[in-house]
Amino acid sequence: MSEQQNIQQPEIHQAAAQEQEIDLIALIKRLWKKRKFVIYVTAGFMVLGLLVALFSKKEFTSNTVFVPQTSSENMAKSSVSQLASMAGISLSEMGGSDQLSPMVYPKLLSNAEFMKELMYTPMKFEEWPEHVTLIDYYTNPEYNKPSFFGAIAKYTIGLPGLLIKAIKGDKEVDSTMMGQNTIPVYTQDEYDCAKILSELVSITINDKDGYIELAARMPEAYVSAQVATVAFNLLEKYITGFKIEKAKATLDYVNDRLAEAKADFEAKQLEYAQYRDANRSLSTATAMIMEEKLRKEYDLSNTIYTELARQKTQVELQVKEDTPVLSVVQPVVVPIERSKPKRAIILIAFTFLGGCLGCAGVFGLDFLKHQGSSWPRGWKTEEEEEADKEVVA
C-alpha cells in the first residue's frame, strides 16, 4: 500500500499542476476574447491620464544646500578667540550657549512666528503687477484660483468637508485677546495658509553626507526661489536667536550693571576731587582719614567699573563667536524645469491602471453573471457564448 501511495502522489501533483496550467491558459484565452473591453477601458484611462497630466497645476521646486557651523568647543580657536586671548580676555570663562541641534531645524518650520513672517512676506508673481503675500495668494479669492481638476475635486470629493465647514462656520478670534495675550494665535486664514506652507516648504537632513537641504515648491519658478530664500533667511535668523539667547541676556545684564557702576564711579570721583580741593591746606588726622576713606571708595568704584567694562567686551566677543554660520554649499537658483506634474509618469500610471482594471473587470463581470446578476445586460459569460454558437450552428 505504501508503494502504491508513493507512486500515486507524483501523479496527483502532476495532475494538479496540469489543471492549474489549463486554468491559466483559459484565463488568458478569456481575456483575449474580451480584448476589446480591456482595450476600451485602458484607452479610457489613458485619455483620463492625459487630461490629468495636461490640466494639473504646475509646480517648480527651488532648494538650497547648507552646512551648519559646528560648535566652537569641537573646533580650533577662532580668530576672534585668539585676538581676545591676546588682549587678556578668556572667552572660555563665559561658557557659551548650547549648540542648537540640526535635527531641530525642521521643527522651526512649524513655529507660529516663523510661519507668520513667511506668509506675510510680499512676493512678486508674474500674473499680478503688485507684490502679493502668501496668505493672500492662498486665502484671498482674488488670487486663489483653483485648477480645473482642483475645482472638480473640491466640489466632489471635498464636498463633505465644505458642508461641514459651512455648518460649523469660521471661528472668530477675539482681537482684544490677541492684543493682551503674549501666546501666538492663528486666525482661520493664517491657520489654513500655515497648513499649505508646511507641505510646500521642507527641510531634509542628510546624516550620511552631513548637509541640510531646504526646498520650496510653488506654482511659479521665480516665486519658488523667493520663498526658498526668505525661508532660509528666517531659518538663519531663528537659529541665531536661539543660539545667542543666553549670551544676549548676559550682555543686557552687564550693560545695565555697567551703567550703574559708571554713575557710581563718576559720583565717587567727583566727591573725592571736591574734598581734596576743599582741604588742600589741612593736615589734621581727621582730614587725612576722611581723604583715605574717600580714596578707597573711589578705588573700589573704579575697580568695579573697569571690571564690568572688561566683562562687557568679553560678552560682546562671545556673542559674535556664538553667532552660528550656515555655510551655503548650493545657493538658491530659479528653476528652469517644472518638478510637477511628471506627465509621462502620470500617463504610464493611468494606462497601467486601466489595463489592470480592464482585466479585473472581465473576471468581475463573469463572476456577477455566474451569480445570476442581470447587469450588465449585454455581457455574456464564456458558457453563454458557446451556447449561442451551438444554436447558430
Image (tube, rainbow, N blue to C red):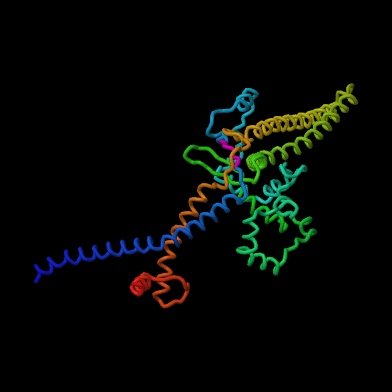
* Total numbered badges shown on the rendered structure: 0
Residue 62, x across and y down, in percent: 61, 40
Image position of 49 (left or right of 114): left
Image position of 69 (left or right of 8): right
- For the residue pair 2 and 210, the one nearer the viewer reads as 2
Would you identify the image quadrant in which residue 102 lies? top right
Residue sticking out furthest to the bottom? 372
Image position of 357 (left or right of 71): left
Residue at the image position 73 percent from the left and 63 percent from the top: 171
- Seen in the picture, residue 114 relative to 277 is either above or below; the reply is below
Magenta region: which residues? 61-67
- Seen in the picture, residue 278 relative to 319 is either above or below; the reply is above
Q: Is residue 263 magenta?
A: no
- For the residue pair 207 and 83, the one nearer the viewer reads as 207
Residue at the image position 82 percent from the left and 32 percent from the top: 268
* Image quadrant in which the N terminus is located: bottom left
Determine if residue 367 is in view: yes
- Seen in the picture, residue 35 relative to 92 is either above or below; the reply is below
Residue 84, x across and y down, in percent: 64, 26
- For the residue pair 379 and 74, the one nearer the viewer reads as 379
* Image quadrant in which the C terminus is located: bottom left
Residue 126, x across and y down, in percent: 71, 42
Main SS, magenta residues? strand
Determine if residue 185 is in view: no
Residue 380, x across and y down, in percent: 41, 71
- Seen in the picture, residue 212 relative to 88 is either above or below; the reply is below
